[in-house]
């Protein structure tokens, strides 16, 4: 630490009598210094020490001065008991008085609140208040000070106590000090830095310095013995406006006639100045750049305090002094920092590898960081040399401390023993450790007489490296110890060969120099505001930067400028390219490894490839991750393993990769591989150049045409490309192009060139023709290749059924597929009967059933019950056909059940359509009587149905419709019965809005007679018994058990009675017997008998004048009248051979069913009621209603067969 006098002044007697300087104060910007000398306030210009003014406002000695933080005013207090407020223009503003001498005034750090202290009290004043509030303390006040945040006010008392109060004057706490009675507190001062500690320094005339931490209300550290009576106390903040380098010190002046600097912890660091009298007051300039002192003999002086840089560096570890008592070790590569606290003045620092040496006032401390962990910065004390060794510089090795003093070098071990002394012939001016093996390190020495020596720690004899004519300023040796760089007092850099002592080169304007520790032929030197990079014998690279070079590692120069260390990255690109120009690729690679851009690595990789240094090239391209050239190098390695390495071919590949195609072609031809050149040019679509090498290399012309075609594709010349592919016989690509672009003519031309054995290509052509809807061309191709199956599939897709069946006649093997697809087509167009026939012709019975089942389910789900009945009838036919073709008994039993189930569902769904429409639509045109019969029919069927009710059929809906219609038809009994049934169904059916209507209907029917209209009761034509409307036996007579035959439109009972044949007569024989008309009946016929037979099989017989009983004339009626009175013992009418011969065939209906079902035989009882029957479904109707349905619907209302449908003779009816 050094201090320099800026200026000093001792006021003459003309200005003021020689009196003590009692107070000093800077204004906030540091441009003025105010001094309280006697009863006057002297104002100095801090720049030159000129006295600007002498203020007279007090009648006695001025004891204290304080400036407001905004610089607008200041205050002074004196022995005249007054406090005077001054403007910054040196004009008095106001004053107020205390009861005794004013000892101290201090302004709040952020406002104009002023604290003033007299011997017995203190006051707080601000411009906003008129009166000053004063508070008495228990002791005599000697000093006061505000904390940096303005929240606390500290008072020092003559009784040795320190009191802390808040900004309103309320006491917070106080510090009771040891031996307080003999230690009056003479001055207190807060640290101006706003931090969490709020550190307060206090000095007393017990010759002690004490530090307090306000936040914890406790003393921090021990009391420091000063050895003199302190008078002045102030804080010095170096670099106050730089957070990263700010340092805090304590200034104390006193009876020792010195102004002394202490650390923040209270350790003595040095002396600012020494005077002839006591230093009564001292203060630091706000920016920390200077210190002002005032003495008891009236001297005022200002000093510039400079803290020298104490540091050491080795490779990437830089250690420097911080706050005079600490050492910070900065790892320049990782930017890690660690602080080593010494708690006393640090004089010298040295570092080597992981070892750190620190010299304090009376000892040397050795620290070591773990060496097994890279970049570990946890330094621990390992040795301590308790000696005060005077030296100008110090270095540390792995085992020794080396100090320099004048002409001598002293070597100590870590125990403090002096091992060796080197005596030089001239004072040592420069010292640098350049390292080496442990215990064999070497040191470079530069002497005042120009000698440069190398000293090994294990060798007592220095070795002369070079001799200059002037003083040596800087020396360094490169990493492989072959060159030494020297700078002398001419500021010239000299570089020598260590072995030959030859001067290699020299450079002017050099102050410091450092070799690169990673590259032996590169150094950096600084001077004249520039840093310079020198590589080998290449020109110097210069960069405008201020500072001294202290290290050079890789591409980073460590530059010390204004006590700050920084790492500057410098480029080495120029040197790399110069090495490449000289073809020194190894040096270029090692230099580039220090840190280069991808562009430089790429250029170096290309240079290595051209020179055939493939290993270096691979390393270069690996850094840039250039996969293209890495693949090329991998190919070279594979070729080398196979023994196929040819430099010309390798160069040709490289030039081709680099885009130098002509050079590549020449190298290919020189290497005996012109086909590579042809392939390269054809890939590049340079077909003219490719033809040149095609001759030379005897290349196949077809491959060239293929390349041209591919190029035409990229140029969007599709047709030209297709023609080229045809010329190259690459038909597949030509076909694809013609097909995708829909060029039917070109595709037909290609097809004509193909042989019929090229099936894949022909098939591809046919597919494209189909996509283009050129079916004629497609058919020709299929015919050419003999693929009838594909041709048939195309016709089927196009629904060209005439063509399909022509093909089927020619190729019967495809009939099954053709009819199957035809059946699907018919089903999709609602031609289900024809679809069934097609499926059967195709032999796909299951498909036929599945289609019908799906149609049935859909119709039920969509409430198309009429369609559902129709589809169920078709399904029953399918099962019946299957039944006739099956011999397995178990399977026939299952099919028989399915047949009966579908027949029943066909009847139910057909009838339910009317009920559903009646209950869901507002108006229907079906007569009530028919709806009534239908409802009764459905209910009777559902009531006697085994198992669950079929899907979508509602018993409740049926009862509801029957109930409503019965009311209209006066079937009161039946209506009430339906109501009772609906009540039973209430629990399983949601009535919805019908509940009220049903209840009203129930009340209304309760009021009517419990009987049905007699005309509504169904008549049994066998026993002539009228049955109840709600019949427990369902659709059978409750008297004789004979089943009713119902019309399938009006659902009333038809005058038909079923009879059966004995077991010894089969159906065909019975039909033959029936066709034989007996003579007796023919003879008894009269001309008046009218017999009418139509296509719907009806017979009307009119007899006149015949009064005989019907049973006598008709043996069937006699046979029919014999029945059991117990309906459970139903006995059908059995007709034998004789009776068959006697029966009139015009009165018989024969319902023919396929095997194994037996035919059914019915006899009409009332010929006057004509009955019709559908020959397809064997359903009976009233003749009139059937003819009307045929006219309206064009066919049977149940099975939907058209009336003009062709009927085979097997379906003839009688």
Image: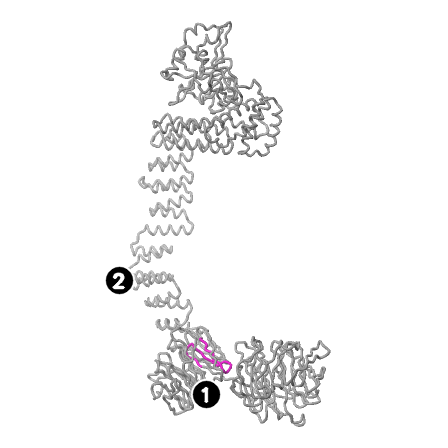
Q: How crowded is mark 1: few (under 14 residues within 10 Å), some or many (20 or more)?
A: some
Residue 985 vertical placement versus 365 (above, below): above
Image quarter for residue 76?
Answer: bottom right
Q: x%, y% of residue 954?
A: 52, 30
- Residue in front for this viewpoint, 934 or 1012: 1012
Image quarter for residue 260?
Answer: bottom right
Q: Residue 836 carries which label?
A: none
* Number of disc labels: 2
Tell me if residue 636 is in the magenta stretch: no
Question: Which residue occupies the extreme left position in the image?
Answer: 643
Query: Helix, strand or loop at disc 2?
Result: loop
- Residue in front for this viewpoint, 695 or 28: 28
Q: x%, y% of residue 1154?
A: 39, 22
Q: Residue 643 carries which label?
A: 2
Circle 1 residue: 362
Question: Which residue occupies the extreme front position in the image?
Answer: 1126
Tell me if residue 320 is in the magenta stretch: yes
Q: Give the range drawn in magenta.
A: 312-331
| Residue 1017 placement, left or right of 698 | right
Query: Helix, strand or loop at disc 1?
Result: loop
């Amino acid at each position: 630490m050094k201090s320099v006098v800026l200026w000093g002044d001792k006021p003459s007697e003309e200005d003021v009598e020689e009196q003590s300087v009692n107070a000093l104060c800077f204004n906030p910007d540091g441009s003025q210094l105010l001094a309280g000398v006697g009863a006057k306030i002297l104002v100095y210009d801090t720049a030159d020490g000129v006295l600007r003014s002498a203020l007279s406002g007090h009648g006695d000695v001025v004891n204290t001065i304080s400036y407001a933080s905004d610089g607008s005013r200041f205050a002074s207090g004196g022995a005249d008991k007054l406090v005077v407020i001054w403007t910054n223009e040196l004009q008095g503003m106001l004053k107020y008085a205390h009861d005794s001498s004013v000892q101290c005034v201090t302004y709040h750090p952020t406002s104009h609140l002023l604290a003033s202290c007299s011997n017995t009290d203190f006051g707080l004043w601000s411009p906003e208040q008129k009166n000053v509030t004063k508070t008495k303390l228990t002791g005599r006040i000697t000093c006061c000070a505000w904390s940096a945040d303005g929240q606390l006010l500290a008072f020092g008392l003559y009784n040795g106590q320190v009191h802390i109060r808040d900004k309103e004057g309320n006491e917070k706490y106080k510090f009771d000090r040891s031996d307080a009675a003999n230690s009056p507190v003479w001055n207190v001062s807060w640290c101006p830095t706003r931090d969490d500690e709020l550190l307060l320094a206090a000095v007393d005339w017990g010759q002690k310095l004490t530090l307090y931490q306000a936040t914890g209300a406790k003393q921090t550290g021990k009391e420091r013995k000063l050895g003199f009576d302190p008078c002045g106390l102030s804080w010095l903040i170096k670099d106050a406006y730089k957070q990263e380098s700010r340092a805090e010190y304590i200034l104390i002046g006193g009876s020792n006639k010195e102004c002394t600097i202490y650390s923040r912890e209270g350790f003595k660091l040095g002396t600012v100045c020494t005077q002839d009298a006591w230093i009564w007051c001292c203060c630091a300039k706000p920016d920390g750049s200077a210190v002002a002192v005032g003495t008891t003999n009236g001297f005022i002086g200002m000093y510039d305090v400079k803290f020298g840089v104490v540091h050491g560096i080795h490779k990437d570890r830089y250690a420097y002094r911080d706050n005079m008592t600490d050492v910070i070790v900065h790892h320049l590569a990782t930017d890690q920092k660690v602080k080593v606290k010494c708690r006393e003045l640090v004089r010298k620092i040295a570092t080597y590898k992981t070892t750190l040496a620190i010299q304090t006032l009376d000892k040397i401390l050795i620290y070591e960081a773990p060496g097994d962990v890279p970049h570990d910065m946890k330094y621990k004390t390992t040795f301590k040399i308790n000696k005060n060794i005077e030296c100008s510089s110090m270095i540390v090795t792995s085992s020794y401390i080396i100090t320099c003093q004048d002409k001598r070098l002293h070597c100590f071990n870590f125990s403090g023993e002096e091992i060796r002394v080197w005596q030089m012939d001239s004072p040592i001016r420069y010292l640098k450790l350049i390292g080496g093996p442990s215990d064999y390190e070497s040191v470079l020495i530069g002497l005042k007489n120009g000698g440069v020596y190398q000293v090994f720690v294990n060798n007592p004899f220095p070795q002369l490296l070079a001799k200059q004519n002037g003083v040596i300023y800087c020396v360094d040796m490169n990493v492989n110890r072959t060159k030494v760089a020297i700078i002398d007092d001419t500021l010239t850099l000299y570089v020598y060969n260590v072995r030959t002592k030859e001067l290699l080169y020299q450079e002017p304007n050099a102050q410091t120099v450092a070799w690169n520790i990673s590259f032996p032929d590169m150094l950096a030197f600084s001077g004249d505001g520039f840093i310079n990079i020198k590589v080998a014998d290449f020109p110097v690279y210069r960069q405008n930067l201020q500072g001294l070079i202290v290290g050079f590692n890789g591409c980073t120069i460590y530059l010390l400028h204004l006590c700050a260390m920084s790492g500057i990255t410098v480029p080495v690109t120029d040197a790399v390219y110069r090495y490449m120009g000289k073809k020194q690729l190894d040096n270029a690679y090692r230099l580039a490894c220090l840190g280069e851009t991808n562009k430089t690595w790429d250029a170096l990789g290309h240079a290595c490839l051209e020179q055939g240094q493939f290993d270096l090239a691979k390393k270069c391209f690996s850094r840039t991750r250039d996969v293209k050239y890495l693949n090329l190098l991998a190919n070279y390695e594979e070729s080398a393993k196979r023994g196929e390495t040819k430099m010309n071919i390798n160069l040709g590949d490289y030039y081709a990769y680099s885009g130098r195609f002509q050079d590549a072609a020449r190298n290919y031809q020189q290497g005996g591989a012109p086909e590579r050149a042809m392939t390269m040019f054809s890939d590049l679509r340079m077909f003219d150049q490719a033809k040149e090498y095609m001759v030379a290399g005897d290349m196949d012309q077809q491959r060239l045409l293929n390349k041209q075609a591919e190029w035409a594709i990229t140029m969007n010349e599709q047709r030209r490309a297709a023609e080229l592919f045809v010329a190259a016989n690459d038909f597949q690509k030509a076909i694809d192009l013609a097909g995708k672009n829909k060029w039917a003519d070109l595709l037909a031309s290609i097809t004509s060139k193909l042989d019929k054995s090229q099936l894949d290509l022909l098939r591809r052509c046919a597919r494209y023709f189909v996509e283009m809807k050129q079916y004629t061309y497609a058919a020709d191709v299929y015919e050419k290749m003999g693929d009838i199956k594909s041709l048939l599939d195309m016709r089927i897709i196009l629904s060209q059924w005439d063509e399909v069946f022509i093909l089927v006649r020619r190729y019967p093997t495809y009939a099954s597929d053709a009819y199957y697809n035809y059946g699907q087509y018919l089903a999709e167009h609602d031609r289900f009967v024809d679809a069934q026939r097609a499926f059967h012709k195709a032999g796909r019975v299951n498909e036929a059933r599945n289609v019908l089942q799906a149609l049935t389910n859909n119709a039920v789900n969509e409430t198309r019950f009429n369609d559902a009945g129709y589809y169920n009838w078709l399904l029953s036919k399918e099962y019946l056909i299957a039944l006739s073709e099956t011999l397995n008994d178990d399977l026939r039993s299952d099919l028989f059940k399915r047949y009966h189930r579908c027949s029943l569902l066909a009847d139910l769904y057909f009838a339910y359509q009317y009920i559903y429409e009646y209950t869901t639509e507002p108006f229907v045109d079906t007569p009530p009587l028919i709806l009534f019969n239908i409802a009764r029919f459905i209910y009777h069927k559902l009531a006697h149905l085994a198992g669950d009710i079929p899907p979508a059929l509602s018993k409740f809906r049926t009862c509801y419709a029957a109930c409503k219609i019965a009311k209209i038809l006066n079937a009161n009994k039946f209506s009430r019965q339906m109501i009772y049934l609906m009540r039973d169904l209430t629990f399983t059916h949601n009535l919805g809005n019908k509940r009220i209507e049903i209840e009203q209907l129930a009340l209304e029917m309760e009021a009517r007679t419990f009987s049905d209209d007699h005309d509504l009761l169904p008549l049994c034509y066998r026993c002539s018994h009228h049955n109840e409307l709600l019949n427990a036996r369902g659709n059978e007579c409750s008297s004789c058990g004979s089943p009713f035959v119902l019309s399938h439109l009006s659902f009333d009972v038809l005058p038909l009675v079923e009879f059966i044949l004995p077991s010894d007569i089969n159906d065909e024989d019975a039909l033959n017997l029936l066709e034989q008309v007996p003579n007796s009946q023919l003879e008894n016929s009269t001309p008046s008998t009218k017999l009418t037979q139509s296509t719907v099989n009806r017979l009307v017989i009119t007899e006149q004048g015949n009064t005989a009983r019907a049973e006598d004339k008709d043996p069937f009626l006699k046979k029919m009248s014999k029945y059991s009175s117990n309906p459970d013992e139903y006995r059908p009418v059995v007709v034998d051979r004789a009776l068959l011969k006697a029966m009139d065939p015009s009165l018989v209906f024969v319902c023919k069913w396929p095997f194994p079902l037996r035919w059914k035989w019915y006899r009409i009882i009332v010929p006057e009621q004509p009955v019709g029957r559908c020959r397809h479904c064997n359903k009976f109707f009233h003749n009139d209603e059937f003819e009307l349905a045929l006219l309206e619907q064009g066919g049977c209302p149940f099975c939907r067969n058209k009336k003009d449908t062709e009927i085979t003779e097997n379906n003839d009816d009688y």
